[in-house]
Image: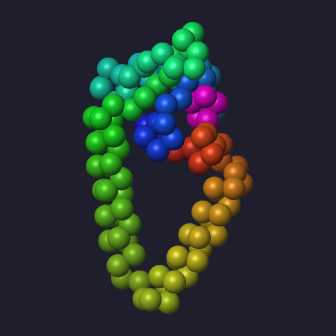
Amino acid sequence: MLSVLVFGGDHSITEMAQAEQVRPPTMTRLIDGMERDGLVRRKPDPRDGRVVVVTATPRGRSVLEAARERRLAGIERTLAPLSATELDAVARAASILETLFVSGGGGVETIGGGPAARR
């Protein structure tokens, strides 16, 4: 959920619930916890004052970036033993998968035009 906010911008709880395929009350409870942890905050929607949107805080962005760096380092370690030919094959496969997911295929719900993060 945090990556949706960091990379996709502010979203309403309803939008986030739809993207994560949960009910709005469930998303509200999740956002409550993230807000208590200082990862997100709620604010009025500038387009409609009746609606509240959720936005990532600087701490939330920092936590997400740190986790992303750890994942990337793990991927690098995993791929390090591969030959150039094998790495080319992995790159081709990744390109095909990216095309499928970014176009909305692959059964992944999207929000803001990109794939919603899965936890």
Badge count: 0
In the rendered image of this protein, does residue 32 appear above or below residue 116?
Answer: above
Residue drawn at x 49%, y 31% is 10
Q: Could you tell me residue 76's position as x and y percent?
A: 35, 70
In the rendered image of this protein, does residue 20 appear above or below residue 23?
Answer: below
Q: Which coloring applies here?
A: rainbow
Residue drawn at x 57%, y 43% is 116
Q: Which residues are magenta?
A: 15-20
Q: Quadrant of residue 92?
A: bottom right
Residue drawn at x 59%, y 35% is 20
In the rendered image of this protein, does residue 50 appear above or below residue 39?
Answer: above
Main SS category, magenta section = helix
Q: Could you tell me residue 28's position as x and y percent?
A: 50, 19
**Taking 54 as reference, is 94 left or right?**
right
Q: Could you tell me residue 48's position as x and y percent?
A: 58, 15
Q: Nearer the viewer, residue 67 or 12?
A: 12
* Residue 25, visible in the rendered structure: no
Which residue reaches farthest top? 50
Which residue reaches farthest front? 47
* Residue 64, visible in the rendered structure: yes
Residue drawn at x 36%, y 57% is 71
Q: Is residue 19 magenta-colored?
A: yes
**Taking 75 as reference, is 45 left or right?**
right
Q: Could you tell me residue 100's position as x and y percent?
A: 68, 61
In the rendered image of this protein, does residue 97 appear above or below residue 111?
Answer: below
Q: Nearer the viewer, residue 59 or 30?
A: 59
Q: Is residue 96 magenta-colored?
A: no
